Image (tube, rainbow, N blue to C red):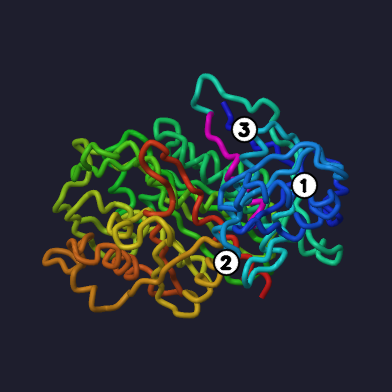
Amino acid sequence: MENREIELEFSIKSGAPEKQRTACVVVGVFEGRKLSDPGQEIDRASGGHLAGILRGGDMEGKAGATLLLHAVPDVLADRVLLVGLGKEREFHEKAYRDAIATSVRTLRDTGSMEAVITLSELAVKKRDVTWNVEQAVIAAHAALYRFDRMKSKREDARRPLKRAVFTVSRRGELKAGEAGLARGLAIAHGIDLAKDLGNTPSNVCTPEYLAAEAKKLAKTYGFGCEVLDQAACEKLGMGSFLSVGKGSDKPPRFIVLKHNGGRKGDKPVVLVGKAITFDAGGISLKPPAEMDEMNYDMSGGGAVLGAFRAVGELKLPLNVIGLVPSCENLPDAHANKPGDIVTSMSGQTIEILNTDAEGRLILCDALTYAERFEPDAVIDLATLTGACVIALGAHPSALFANHDPLAREIEHAADHAWDRVWRMPLWDDYQDQLKSSLADMANIGGRPAGSITAACFLSRFAKKYHWAHLDIAGTAYKGGRDKGSTGRPVALLVHFLLARAEN
């Protein structure tokens, strides 16, 4: 069974909202019953009909509130949907995205098959039309996303939303809106792919499954694709990567994707994604609580594949390499044991003090493999440490970098994508925690600063290029009863690559 694509057509339009022939026009209301500009236009055309309803107390404009009106006088649309925006002075990026999501979910639940959404005209501080439309498309996709391929019965909307038109206030903004639409669709499709891969359970989403998905992408978008099996990895000396999967009967796969969109000879950007398709912790077995969420330990690899889908759709004029080391981390007689020493592809030896610190063991060989491409920059992303979740929660991803200009690039891309990061220290002071009396280093540095020492470990394998590490343990998925992939940080990666392609 294939997960269904969201069958929703988007377009951009300008024009008077009261003259739109559609099932529904969506306008915003700030607290204090203040209509947005398009709402005021509809109100004037209808002889004050909206203002009268608001004065009656049916809606105050609180964030998340909705009110559906039928047969508004002198308005061509069948319905007008009022969406609460909260306080105008506090209206920012999150409030904007939430309003779009609320409107789309309400349209779906009320049976509207098409709608004109004027919320894209709202002023968001320091953001432009392109940003508004791009984020509207992404938020709409997220609101409608469902992962139901594993269910025997699927619940279909009575009359699902089929077409959404985002408006701009002037015809001169149509070009900027179209640019935002193209970017938003590409990013949304990439996020959806990352979500699908993350939400697919580990008995289906194995290393070989991820390799097959990479091959599909390559065939669709003309990427180069190579999948290294165990024998090929052994020949390369990837002793650290291969040690992690020894306890599983699912063979490891090292996936290499290549997008040659730039000039021949231009140094590529390399994206490296951790893809542990299930992490039981190995011999250092995790506690049972929440272990069901450990299929999401491949979220870094899933985000790389999602970013590549967006790169393919946008046909970015840039050379990009994707590296996805993938395996399972399970306990059996062949598995890594605490105290084992392995030799990485770099030749450096690692004493494994905790087999549940396995992500760094697969990433370190991928970082060494990246050297062969003589990269302009390398970004790895991984659900690496629980310590990162304690430090930052679920809002920003942790950013580490050995090159300040690269870190600033990523911070700028994260802000523009609204897929935020927070930079953490990568000081040499922390390196001492990784000392081993028997090997070149240990794979853990104790409880203090766990996310930082993990990054310090990786930095030892990234000395030959500009490198950044994103710990996405808190941002890549949500746990609990409503567990599911967020698709982050696909948007961040795409914006980083877009900025590179434009310079």
First in residue order: circle 2 vs circle 1: 1
* Rendered view: 292 above or below 342: above
> Are the two marked residues, 1 and 3, in contact with CB atoms closer than 8 angstroms?
no
* Rendered view: 160 above or below 117: above
x then y, percent, for residue 176: 77, 64
User: Which is closer to the viewer, label 2 or label 1?
Assistant: 1
State the residue at coordinates (43%, 69%). Answer: 468
Q: Crowdedness of circle 3 by 10 Å Cα count: few (<14), some, many (20+)?
A: few
Numbered badge on residue 116:
1
| Picture quarter with the C terminus | bottom right
Q: Crowdedness of circle 2 by 10 Å Cα count: few (<14), some, many (20+)?
A: many
Cα distance in 3D space between marks 2 and 1: 31 Å
First in residue order: circle 2 vs circle 3: 3
x then y, percent, for residue 81: 70, 44
Residue lying at the far top of the rendered structure: 152
List the residue tagged with mark 2: 496
Which region shows up in magenta? Answer: 135-148
List the residue tagged with mark 3: 4
x then y, percent, for residue 244: 29, 47
Residue 137, magenta (yes or no): yes
Q: Mark 2 falls on what kind of element?
A: helix
